[in-house]
Amino acid sequence: MKKFGLEKRLLFIMAMIFALVLTACDNAARLEGEGDDGGETEELAPEDITIGLSVSTLNNPFFGKLENGVVETAEGQGSTVQTVDAQDDTATQINDIDDLLQQDVDILLINPVDSDSIVPAVESANDADIPVITLDRSSSGGEVVTLIASDNVEGGEMAAEYIVDSVGEDANVVQIEGVPGASASNERGEGFNNIAEDQLNVFESQSGNFNRSEGLSVMENLLQSHSDIDAVFSQNDEMALGAMEALESAGLDDDVMVIGFDGNDDAIQSVEDGDLDGTVHNSLMIWAN
């Protein structure tokens, strides 16, 4: 098995998130007290902090793992986490965040369904002086303390380069894209196309909404349109595993290379079993057979 890039530990990332939570809450408390007449600003201790966590979908194992990391790290410090699951629906996410704001959370961690649609929710948090940190995907507007994510552009480039190295230049490829409008989709596609435009023959790109069953359906459709596909780049592992199912059903799993993105446990196990050809881990290395 070949590995490329540097390993970053999930616990380190979660510890960094929690350090930012403490800093953001402290800064918000200070700002809130600036207009007081000589009153002292109370700094929040970890056990006094309630974190609101809005996740795009917990059906995706990657985001389930992210939630577990946030909860374990925060509770280890004595803080409380309230998690809401948008189930990949932007209206649900905005309503969920409004509910969290009504519950007086001290900080919001948001993994947006859509980078544009999340802006009003971020601005509502800004108006309430509640700090916002975005996870894995950015917000197109509003004030955000920071975005914590892997370099999706570089990851997309790594996937394309691996296909070129493994299959050769001018290979016929298709791309299964994520949720339209999500920054991760845009950036992974941008990185892939940076290399693919000059070195690969990209037949077509279709959205599978980061969903395994949709990845299967998209792959079935692509196989009907293109009989000579050499490789598939899927913008996440769930869609890649769905694509593998479609290729296996068509008897083409040994003929078409499939590369996913995220480094989920299921994907890494599939690579180790000799099924999935590779996945770009979010710490920016490729696991490949």
Image (cartoon, rainbow, N blue to C red):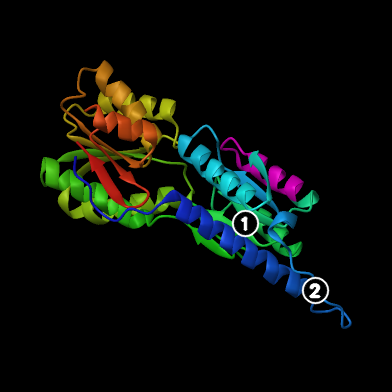
Q: Secondary structure at mark 1?
A: helix
Q: Is residue 42 left or right of residue 117?
A: right
**What type is the residue that disc 1 sits on?**
Val
Q: Earlier in the sequence, mark 2 or mark 1?
A: 2
Task: Kindly identify the residue that appears in the image at 72 percent across and 55 percent down.
Answer: 47
Q: Nearer the viewer, residue 202 or 188?
A: 188
Q: Is residue 197 magenta?
A: no
Quadrant of the rendered image containing residue 46: bottom right
Amino acid type at mark 2: Thr
x and y, in percent, of residue 144 in the image: 59, 64
Q: Is residue 62 visible?
A: yes
Left or right of residue 128, residue 22 in this image: left
Nearer to us: label 2 or label 1: 2
Which residue occupies the extreme right position in the image?
A: 37
Q: Quadrant of the N terminus?
A: top left
**Which residue is under mark 1?**
119
Q: Is the stretch drawn in magenta largely helix, strand or loop? A: helix
Residue in the picture at 19% in, 47% down: 162
Q: Secondary structure at mark 2?
A: loop
Write down the residue under mark 2: 41
* Part of the protein shown in magenta: 85-100
Up the image or down, 109 lies above or below 252; here it is: below
Depicted 289 relative to depicted 118: above or below: above
Q: How many marks?
A: 2
Which corner quadrant of the image does residue 206 belong to? top left
Badge 2: residue crowd in 10 Å (few <14, some 14–19, many ≥20): some
Q: Which mark is residue 11?
A: none
Q: Position of residue 288 (x, y in %)?
A: 22, 39
| Position of residue 32 in the picture relative to residue 223 (left or right) | right
Q: Alpha-carbon distance for marks 2 and 1?
A: 29 Å
In the image, what residue occupies the spot 27% across and 16% down? 249
